[in-house]
């Protein structure tokens, strides 16, 4: 049977040693995030994930969700009780506004909790995860009345939230949506239409569900410019905060999916449901993007989280499974065969996973820290840089971490051999669950197009040039440190390749947009590999300074050197491929495929 233990030690290393959160104690929220409070949150969160959520992971996968005859939905056995504990323990309130009963701690801590929850039970974690995103969108774009009416109970998790974008005829191209909104004399709207693939659209975990719905007001302009955002509660909320009549929104069916069976993925029917405009007319995408960007970081985190739990179980198997003898002679002569961890190719798979996971964890947390600085720093320049980085890094976190997360889960399954292909060992569920992360919240191909088509050129390339300068400053400050030489040389080479690829795109992407499209995925992976090289260089610097009696730091350096020598060279292939442009991709006529 599989197991999960939260990587608390690695999280502590990032928070206390690499990011040094104590240095931000002058900022709101950070002053309360003392090292002992952080440790307590990580340890208790890890315990909840391991003891309460992980045992339900296979239950949710095997049972799935059930739509009842009255259009209500039953989640898997144990989910309602676990969710009740999750709310009663105050976990959703970790980083929420103090005004709404939250603890007001940095969002970065909520990211760490989300990783543990997602590793333990990805399908369960989607319910509070989407609620958090809907809450943030309402806080950013909603009226004071809407914030007061829905904010506190969404913050606590007592009420859930969803995002309703996709329709049968449109996925990525939201300009094609047909859901309509008809204004009423009392200021509300009647919402009519159908939404599909709505995670948590109906469930038995909360008393109310606050749906955020994209719709087109009658007479609105065509395309994206005519889309508005509406808040449509499952139950109308009375003036005193109590629940009133049932709204005309219902679950028309559940999707039969490859994975994440424990999450209810619904077809939602809106039949003149009552809704209220969020923000301005025809400006709905502006507010929805707040939720989408938060969700994209969360999806990248899911890729990392599933890789972590798959890796842990692969390590256990590699140490326990006896198969053949070491190529250099028996390592366990008292046993009939050696454990498979003695074989170089098994170690390759494990170290590929480990080096990715640890680098990706810092990359995600480092990016999330900039999100906190964007909201909390009094320094305008710091906020500008943080905003630039959040925009630039979000598609990389989402796509690179999920692509590599799937690879890690596949490698973990492969390492198990035939056992990995059977349900008993849990590996095949991790692969099935993580597969959706490459698709939802914008496919990884769309993320790559967003990176090269929008994020690189924004503000004259200010974000990417700032990132290059930061790497150069780090190299300049540490290139005389002999112990860091492999990391500095690797980072210097990767950054040069990324800069070369960026220049090529700037020179060739605008003259032929297909060149940008053809290069986009390789460019994103080149960016991701370089970003993780920077993260590993930062961790190596800290490990060199901290190492002594604790072998953790020596292990960190060994893993980092593996990343530099065995994974980072992939940058050369990505650069070579992206510079071939669109011609090889577009040469074959469509009918010849």
Image: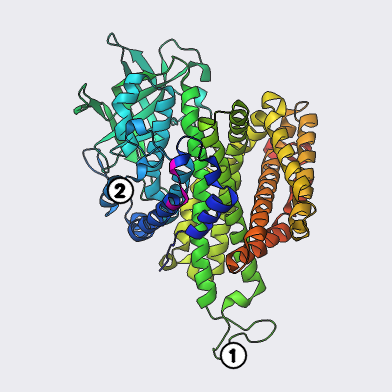
Query: Looking at this rendering, what residue extends furthest in the bottom direction?
Result: 334
- Residue 474 is inside the magenta segment: no
Query: Which one is earlier in the sequence, the residue at label 1 or at label 2?
Result: 2
Q: Helix or strand or loop: what does disc 1 sit on? A: loop
Mark 1 is surrounded, within 10 Å at the Cα level, by few (under 14), some (14 to 19) or many (20 or more) other residues, namely few
Residue at horizontal 51 percent and vertical 31 percent from the top = 375
In this orientation, which residue lies closer to the viewer: 412 or 132? 132
- Give x and y (percent) for residue 85: 28, 50
* Direction from residue 194 to residue 9 in the image, left or right: right
Query: Looking at this rendering, what residue extends furthest in the top direction?
Result: 185
Residue 89, numbered circle: 2
Q: Quadrant of the C terminus?
A: top right
Image quadrant assignment for residue 582: top right
- Give x and y (percent) for residue 403: 59, 49
- Give x and y (percent) for residue 50: 38, 60
Q: Residue tagged by mark 1?
A: 333
Q: Helix or strand or loop: what does disc 2 sit on? A: loop
* Direction from residue 459 to residue 35 in the image, left or right: left
Mark 2 is surrounded, within 10 Å at the Cα level, by few (under 14), some (14 to 19) or many (20 or more) other residues, namely few
Relative to 174, residue 301 above or below: below
In this orientation, which residue lies closer to the viewer: 395 or 132? 132
Whole-angstrom CA distance, mark 1 to mark 2, is 50 Å
- Give x and y (percent) for residue 467: 69, 38
Camera sees residue 62 = yes
Relative to 326, residue 144 above or below: above
Residue at horizontal 54 percent and vertical 40 percent from the top = 24
Relative to 290, residue 14 above or below: below
- What residue span does the magenta drawing correspond to? 32-36
Relative to 441, residue 359 above or below: below
In this orientation, which residue lies closer to the viewer: 589 or 4? 4
Q: Main secondary structure of the magenta part?
A: helix
């Amino acid at each position: 049977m599989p197991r999960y233990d939260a990587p608390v030690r690695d999280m502590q290393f990032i928070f206390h040693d690499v990011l040094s959160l104590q240095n931000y104690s002058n900022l709101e929220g950070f002053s309360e995030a003392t090292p002992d409070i952080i440790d307590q949150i990580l340890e208790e969160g890890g315990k909840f994930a391991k003891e309460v959520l992980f045992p339900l992971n296979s239950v949710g996968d095997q049972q799935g969700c059930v739509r009842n005859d009255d259009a209500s939905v039953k989640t898997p056995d144990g989910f309602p009780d676990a969710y009740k504990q999750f709310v009663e323990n105050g976990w959703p309130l970790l980083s929420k506004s103090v005004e709404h009963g939250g603890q007001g701690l940095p969002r970065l801590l909520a990211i760490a909790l989300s990783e543990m929850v997602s590793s333990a039970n990805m399908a369960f974690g989607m319910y509070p995860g989407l609620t958090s995103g809907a809450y943030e969108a309402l806080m950013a774009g909603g009226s004071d009345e809407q914030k007061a009416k829905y904010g506190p109970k969404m913050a606590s998790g007592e009420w859930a939230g969803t995002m309703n974008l996709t329709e049968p005829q449109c996925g990525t191209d939201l300009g094609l949506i047909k859901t309509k909104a008809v204004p009423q004399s009392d200021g509300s709207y009647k919402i009519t239409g159908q939404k599909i693939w709505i995670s948590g659209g109906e469930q038995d975990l909360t008393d109310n569900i606050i749906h955020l719905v994209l719709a087109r007001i009658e007479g609105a302009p065509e395309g994206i410019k005519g889309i508005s955002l509406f808040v449509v509660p499952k139950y109308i909320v009375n003036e005193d905060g109590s629940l009133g009549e049932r709204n005309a929104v219902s679950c028309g069916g559940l999707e039969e999916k490859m994975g994440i069976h424990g999450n209810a993925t619904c077809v939602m029917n809106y039949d003149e449901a009552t809704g209220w405009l969020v923000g301005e007319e025809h400006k709905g995408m502006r507010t929805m993007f707040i939720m989408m960007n938060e969700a994209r970081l969360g999806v990248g985190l899911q890729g990392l989280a599933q890789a972590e739990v798959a890796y842990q179980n692969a390590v256990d198997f590699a140490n326990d499974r006896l198969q053949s003898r070491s190529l250099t002679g028996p390592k366990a002569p008292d046993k009939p065969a050696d454990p498979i961890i003695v074989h170089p190719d098994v170690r390759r798979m494990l170290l590929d996973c480990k080096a990715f996971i640890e680098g990706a964890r810092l990359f995600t947390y480092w990016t999330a820290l900039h999100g906190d600085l964007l909201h909390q720093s009094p320094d305008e320049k710091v906020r500008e840089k943080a905003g630039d980085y959040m925009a630039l890094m979000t598609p990389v976190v989402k796509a690179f971490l999920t692509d590599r997360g799937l690879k890690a889960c596949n490698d973990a399954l492969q390492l198990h051999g035939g056992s990995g292909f059977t349900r008993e060992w849990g590996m095949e569920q991790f692969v099935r669950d993580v597969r959706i992360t490459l698709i939802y919240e914008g496919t990884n191909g769309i993320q790559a197009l967003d990176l090269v088509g929008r994020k690189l050129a924004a503000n004259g390339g200010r974000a990417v040039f700032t990132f290059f300068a930061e790497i150069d400053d780090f190299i300049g400050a540490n290139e005389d440190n002999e112990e860091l030489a492999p990391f500095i040389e690797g980072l210097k080479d990767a950054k040069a390749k990324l800069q070369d690829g960026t220049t090529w795109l700037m020179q060739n992407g605008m003259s032929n947009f297909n060149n940008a499209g053809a290069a986009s995925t390789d460019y994103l992976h080149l960016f991701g590999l370089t970003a993780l090289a920077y993260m590993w260089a930062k961790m190596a610097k800290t490990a060199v300074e901290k190492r002594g009696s604790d072998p953790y730091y020596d292990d960190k350096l060994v893993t980092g050197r593996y990343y530099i020598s065995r994974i980072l060279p992939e940058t050369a292939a990505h650069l070579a491929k992206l510079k071939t442009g669109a011609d090889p991709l577009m040469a074959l006529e469509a009918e010849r495929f």
